[in-house]
Image (cartoon, rainbow, N blue to C red):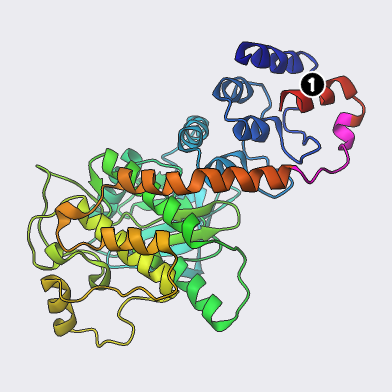
Amino acid sequence: MKDDLVARVQAIFDYDVNPNALNEDGDTLLHSAIRAQSEDIIDLVLNIPGVNISTCNREGVTPLILAIKLGYRKIAQKIYSFTCSTIAEFNVPSNAITIHYKTNLGGGRFGSVYKATLYNEEVAVKIPHRGNEREILKEIEIMQKCRSPYIVDLKAISIQNDSPKLALQYMDCGDLRRYHEDKRMGRPTQIQVTSFEVAWVVANALVDLHAQNALHRDIKSSNILLSTNHYIKVGDLGISRDIISDTMTGVVGTLCWTAPEVIRSERYNFAADIYSFGVVLAELDAKNEPYLNLTKGMDLFGKIARGTIKPSLSSTCEPWLKNLAEMCLSFNPQQRPSAQTVVDILQARFAQSTRDDNRVQRSNSTPVPSTFQNQPAVYLLVKHCF
């Protein structure tokens, strides 16, 4: 059956059909193959001359984002890897990046971030503060090592002078912290995301980081970025580090999101990121930062370090979120789930509801686009296959 399906789709190629055209459901052939979870067909489509993996379907979603939204982690990685393989130039001359210094997007202890243009593409560029060039070079090393569809992409670097620059994906909707603020204030937002969608992306980002023996060390709402084009991504690997001998020491990160063992300057490992993820889950419940009504001082941080206080969850918190947050916020690092276990928990809840939503969406048919009206045989074959 599968061989027959692949053969039928291969026949479509012989008609010299535009592989980026939309079918009656508003999808390209690649979108349809993703929905069918047919990796053989995805491989075929990715190798068609002229295929554009950035083409959006009628809902404005690219194939990569569709795979992420449907929870198809393996397929998302396949498409992302193909995307990375098409990047011809990485280390670019300094004049390839035009920085718009009037548009400051933020910054931290090591550098500032500005809106910029890389050739004709909008990007965000991080420039180190004086004396922090080595930290930026470390960030470049981590980002090159830990490439993931769930982490903000490093588009290019420029290290041809004394001030290295990182050109990153431009996330036009800001961060989750601002998103929650806009929601609380009744302000319109450019993108709509659910707590589950955020949890899914962040958990997958941690799986990919930890698989490369790297810790993020600063998971928090202001490092979870949103975009109309790139969906949800984890950003700011500025203090991420390789894990050495399975343990690290030293206080890093933002204290309200920091694991107790890190505040106590004890040895820590991947479980520290999971605790920070648990704090983000509490933020998703409250739609606000943790410990909002408490004075931020040594007394609070002492309580976090001793485990006598942790972010609270509301009485209306969704059960899946409450259960997962409580596991991740365990005082004992050994009792926290791994990032892969978190993904498995979310996947179990996610898969069926996603398929149900997908079936509802695809039941709403629309007229056949003109692209296919002149080639009915091809259109019927595509419709039959999917």
Residue 127 covered by magenta stretch = no
Query: Of 9 and 137, which appears nearest the observer?
Result: 9
Which residue occupies 86% across, 32% down?
A: 371
The residue tagged 1 is 381
Disc 1 is placed on an element classified as helix
Which residue occupies 88% across, 41% down?
A: 367
Which residue occupies 9% across, 42% down?
A: 245
In the rendering, at what x and y percent does residue 154 appear?
A: 42, 46
Query: Of 237 and 269, which appears nearest the observer?
Result: 269
The magenta segment: 363-372
Instruction: Say whether residue 333 is left or right of residue 128.
Output: left
Query: Of 150 and 136, which appears nearest the observer?
Result: 150
Residue 274, by quadrant, is: bottom left
Which residue occupies 30% across, 65% down?
A: 129
Can residue 351 be seen at all in this image of the molecule? Answer: yes
Furthest toward the right, the residue is: 374
Instruction: Say whether residue 223 is left or right of residue 351.
Output: left
Q: Which quarter shows the C terminus?
A: top right
Instruction: Say whether residue 139 is left or right of residue 176.
Output: left
**In the displayed structure, would residue 335 be above or below residue 260?**
above
Q: Which quarter shows the N terminus?
A: top right
Question: Which secondary structure is most common in the magenta stretch?
Answer: loop
